[in-house]
Amino acid sequence: MKKFSIKNVDFKDLKDLKEIHKVQKGIFGADAIKWDWWFDLIEDNLLFLKIVPSKLNEIIGAIVVTHLKKDDPLYPGDYIPVFFIKENYQRKGYGTFFFKESLKRLRKLMVQFLYLHTKDYNQPALNFYKKFGFKIIEFFEKYYGSGDNSYLLEMKI
């Protein structure tokens, strides 16, 4: 595996945010996070990381973890609205490496539970999350803007 570094996303330079938005829009299409919502993620994030090849200045993946509000039924857990690895880097170990490193940082922050949504038919994503201990806890019909269904997954850290 090539050498990569995991870095905090720099919000002072919108270049990172624009690149992450563009990549996730290419991956998720109509279900990608809208540009305006990224600014809410900046304010509410617990963790916002990118993975970058050591010899390139190219973001190949990102993760965002946000705090859930006290009135959220999943509180005191935290939520992952964004996790992706560029398609040409998938199934090569980079996502596993990046997710493991992110979990280490979350443990240091005393996170107890993590939640995320994934499409019900996205078996590679479901398998990926299950190997980290995520379990399906709920099904949502037409959850995504595209009309696709979703599973809500939970992990105790």
Image: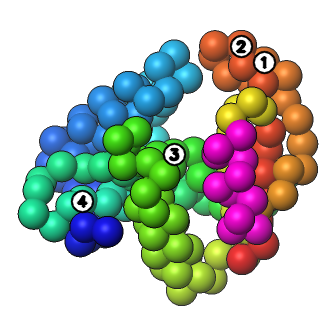
Query: Which residue has dot 3 on it?
Result: 82
Magenta region, residue range = 123-133
Residue 128 visible from this viewpoint: yes
For the residue pair 131 and 36, the one nearer the viewer reads as 131
The residues bearing labels 4 and 3 have C-alpha atoms spaced at a distance of 16 Å
Decide whether the magenta segment is chiefly helix, strand or loop.
Answer: helix
Q: What residue type is labelled 1?
A: Lys
Q: Which amino acid does label 4 sit on?
A: Val
Among numbered discs 2 and 3, the one appearing first in the sequence? 3
Q: Quadrant of the C terminus?
A: bottom right
> Which residue does the image show at 51% across and 16% down from the upper left?
30
Among numbered discs 1 and 2, the one appearing first in the sequence? 1
Q: In the rendering, at what x and y percent does residue 52 appear?
A: 24, 59
Query: Which residue has dot 1 on it?
Result: 142
Residue 8 visible from this viewpoint: no
The colour scheme applied to this rendered structure is: rainbow
